Amino acid sequence: MTALSFADAMQLFVVGLSQGCLYSLIAIGLVLVYKATEQVNFAQGEFMMLGAFVGYQFIVLMGMPYWLGAMLTLAFMGAFGYGVEALVVRRLTGQPVFTVFILTLALGIALRAVAGIIWGFGNYLLPAPVDGNLTLGPVIISWASVLSIVVTAVVASALYLFFRYARQGIAMQALSLNQLAAFYMGIPVKRLTSSIWAMSAIFGGIAGLLLGPMTLVSTQMGFIGFKAFAGAIVGGFGSIPGAVIGCLLIGVTEPFFDIMFPTLKGIGAYLIMFLVLLIRPQGLLAQIYAKKV
Amino acid sequence: MRVIFRKSYVQDIQLFRDRGQAFWYLLFAAIALAAPLFLDGYFLDELSFVFIYAIAGLGLMVLTGFSGQVSFGQAAFVAIGAYTHTILLTRYSVPWLLSLPIAALVAGLVGLAVGRICGKMHGLYLAIATLSIAIVTERLIGGAGDFTGGHGGLSVPEINILGLAIDESWKVYLLNFVIFVGCTLIVRNLTRTRSGRAMIAIRDSEVSARALGTNVAFFKAYAFFISAVFAGLAGGLLAHAFFYITPETFGMGESIRLLLMIVVGGIGTIHGAVFGAFFIVLLPTVLSWVKIVLPSAVATSGGFDSLAFGVILLGFILFEPDGLYGRWTKIHHYFNVFPMYKKRSFQRQKTFLKTERLR
């Protein structure tokens, strides 16, 4: 192990923090769906990739101003998420959770192929909304990373408040506890479920737009969705603060891990997840209680 | 339609349901044994792949189909089997007949350890944990360059059993077929015995299985062990079929492909593993035939194969969740009860969602 100077460590920490924020944006999309419908969307990473590609289409290929293009992308993602739930996932209501795993995996494969057919399998550059770097003493951080941290903080706290206080948010939680009972209580189950998928797809789109400028846009970028999974598991699936904390933990430790063990580069996230699962199989901030027969 | 009146519980767990079924299986076995007489090398190689994937699929079927633990990490055990086998053969010149069982056992022991750790987890947590095992294994094999050849890979020697070189397609085919039949009998016998029924009980309801006195943790780990042994065995055979192995061959994508294979075949059935193996091995060939008919713009774009794969899977999950074997039983049933067929008799029961978090 090479000794790190304090400045280098701070630099790695900040880089990891912004990376962790992107993971948590994806994880928020995952947890949102899981919290409300108990379904798991293994295509969330591909939703993010689709968001990045649609943004690329609007902003670069069609030459729109950034913010207009971004808004249109998010609108498109919302419609897409709504449509996916209403047309495909809804048919599996009442089937074992396992079928939704497989369905979304297949959806992810299909989405990656479709994106490749439409936009090609290369790497594309998506412009960042803000240029330049922020210099804090020895630490240099790009404004794009700062933006991703800010956006994540805003989104996460807004969602936390939404689930805690808003009528719709509480209805969504009721939905997850018992669909049938929620339906009898007058909750529009179908519409609400579709809206949740729309929201989750929008968060995927936001993550894609933020990640696009940092790494290039490609069909393979969806695979970081699996790291978001690891982060969400560390925090405890089904809890938004947990997912954010877990993803930040993973994001921050990952660069240090990569530097300490260069041969094991890229698997730090999973090893950390394993460690946490060994100690607390339900995650750090879990919402799991004993089951009664 | 043959109606069987069961007079004892033993009849429920016979190897074959009746003599007719035994006749058909033996006939198929005879045809498969005679296949080298009338098929050329290419088809025999493809069929060898089918048998190898079917072995891996049988293992995953025990784990996911019978004991209900969704594993996204099966390729890790395939990789461990393949690498152990190849390293034993090349580096330590262990005889083939010894190195294959050792490879299977090593994979099995790793599987047992994983099963012991992961036995506490459920559904999603288990899926991600096993997925990470697949990723970590791939990376570890790639990282241990001195021993495993790293990302450059290893070349695999020919099969040599007691001085008898298995060098032609038909010999490899027969060897794979015999091992496959053995594995099928083992899994079939597992479903007939106490352990197999314990696994199915755990799949259907863990709480009630525990209430009935089943040692849940033991049988979950046991399922992991069996499945990893089969995966290791398949890995050893697969290494010979590929001639050259790299860690990327057994990555996360391969795990997911194996899982999707048993879903397409029909989850929870032994036939399903075989049908799924046929599907996954023959799909590229069929797609290349389809491409001839399609306009060239669609056919030459790189994503066509995976798009077709994804869409076929989506179709299966949505319209035929029981997979190819489910479709086969429906067709069979249709002709059995000819004018009386009712779609409803196969309708799946819906259970409305109650939270999984409560456990």
Image (cartoon, coloured by chain):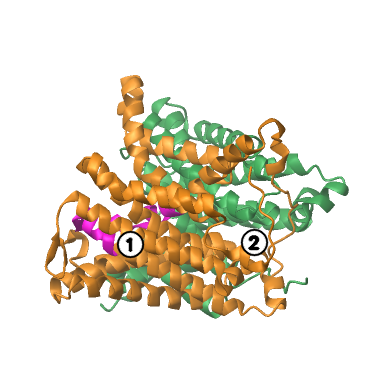
Task: Tell me which residue sits at (57%, 71%) in the image.
Answer: B121
Residue B78 lies in what quarter of the image?
Answer: bottom left
* Residue B36 highlighted magenta (yes or no): no
The circle on residue B179 is 1
Number of marks in the image?
2
Q: Is residue B51 above or below residue B149?
A: above
Q: Residues within 10 Å of mark 2 (few under 14, many from 20)?
A: many
Chain painted green: A
**Chain B display color:** orange
Q: Quadrant of the N terminus of chain A?
A: bottom left
State the image coordinates of residue A212 (x, y, percent, origin top left). 41, 44
Subunit under mark 1: B
Q: Which residues are magenta?
A: B236-260
Q: Is residue B250 magenta?
A: yes
| Chain letter of disc 2 in the image | A
Across and down, in percent, residue A225 comes to 47, 53
Task: Name the residue rendered at 20%, 43% in the picture.
Answer: B41
In the picture, the disc for residue A238 is 2
